Amino acid sequence: MKLTFWGAAQTVTGSMHELSVDGQRFLLDCGTYQGRRKEARERNSTFPFPAAQVNAVLLSHAHIDHSGNLPSLVNKGFNGPIYTSPATADLCDPLLLDSAILQERDAVFLNKRAARKRTLLGPDGDNGEVHPVYTAEDVESTLLLFQKVLLHTPTEVGKGLQYETFEAGHILGSTVMLLEGRENGKTVKLVFSGDVGRPGLPIVPDPEPCPAADYLIMESTYGGRLHQQLGHAIDKLADVVVRTAERGGKIIVPAFALGRTQQLVLMLHELTDQKRIPNIPIFVDSPLAVKTTKVFRGHQAAYDAETSAWNHRGIEPFDWKQLRYVQDVNESKALNDLHGPFIVISASGMCEAGRVLHHLRNNIESPRNTVLITGFQAEHTLGRKIVEKHREVPIFGELMRLRAEVVKLNELSGHADQKELLQWLDTAAPSLKRIFLVHGEPLQQQPLARAIEQQYKVPVTIPARGESFTL
């Protein structure tokens, strides 16, 4: 077996690892690379191998940095099966289509800008037309290739390669993969962690322990950090809602459409049910969040015990009287004329696009309001500027005074921290010959590598993009 790292190598984006077994090529994830526009387009539109020669893709979960480049692979000639969990397959439907629409809009924008530049510079300007990395048609072709595999169901995915999945506890449908390869009379077991979640996260079950194997590819997003305890999150959320409602303000919550929105809705339902917050209106203003929540409702068997208990009592956990899902753009605009107090949960999570920008523009300058940040904010994003409490922040090209209260709710991180990662691999450590750390930046990977080697005496490698290893 030969393992080559092509994505999420010393970075947290574009997860993609190539496994060669007995002359066959398999991909572990095929995620969108996110970064500078030119580099991202180049990485996502080309592959370092012939796409048509890939026998199958094994997908850990639906987040775009793990699944988002599948349509590009199909566009380049891949036509094999994509093995994943039922919930992941269903979530990829709206997520990949939304990504294609954004790709198409992006191409239109770039072409218009280039046309204006040619008008200014004359006919010798750049005439290269930008095309979407992939289209909605590519997404439709991709969705036909999904093969749904239940947890704990050993499945032959190619000659000499067996695949079995375990609960990762990261988002709905997320999995850890155990791959057993047979080649030249030898058997090698490899685990790919995907993204490992945290015990006690809302909705999803806790991560199952890492299965025993010879080698482990492990995420390291927060390998150098320790998270705050999850128990504080719901108390902090209640305090923010009560405090803002008392002053008649609005709470604007930028949140990713998959995972974080559903977590927040469930927590607000619980607080409403317990009468810990006032009965103020709550709006989920994100068409993609509406679609992904519908998928959640169709996969109740994948819930944890606490979320399942709502259904056992005959209560829909993601719907109640005060909650309203907004799809129509005019209804979204109407929220700007509605007086508080109320809550708006809207994408995008880092405030870089989507309807949340309109809500921020209309509410960020009032000290009565609150901006509630619930996830990691990358450098240079509007969300980072808000978290850092810049005096002025740019929205739609206009500098606006940041007078609203800013609150961070960091406890809901879907990635295990260093201590949780060490606990997760504890049962597998005695069998491991080597661990490869991926999906992390070096500043997070290096302390995790030291902690693993110190605690478990297992050699750790931090592979670079394009590096190969024989297992």
Image: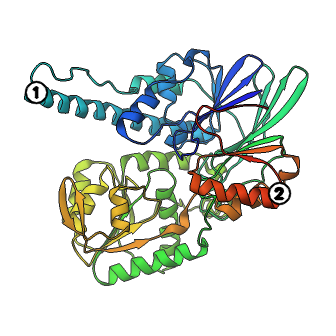
On the image, the x and y values in percent for residue 373 come to 41, 65
Q: Residue at x 48, y 46 (%)?
A: 292
**Helix, strand or loop under label 1:** helix
Which mark sits nearer the N-terminus, 1 or 2? 1
x and y percentages locating residue 209 in the rendered image: 78, 54
Q: In which quarter of the image is the N terminus?
A: top right
Q: Is residue 335 visible?
A: no
The residue depicted at 61 percent of the width and 65 percent of the height is 225
Crowd tier of the residue under label 2, counting other residues whose Cα lies within 10 Å: few below 14, some 14–19, many 20 or above: some
396 with respect to 211 (left or right): left
Question: Could one spot residue 42 in this view of the protein?
Answer: yes
Q: Quadrant of residue 106?
A: top left
Q: Mark 2 points at which residue?
A: 456
Q: Where residue 144 is drawn, which disc sits there? A: none
Quarter of the image holding residue 388?
bottom left
**C-alpha gap between disc 1 and disc 2:** 62 Å
Q: Name the residue under label 1.
A: 121
Colour scheme of the rendered structure: rainbow
Q: Nearer the viewer, residue 312 or 460?
A: 460
Q: Disc 2 marks which amino acid?
A: Tyr
Q: What element carries label 2?
A: helix
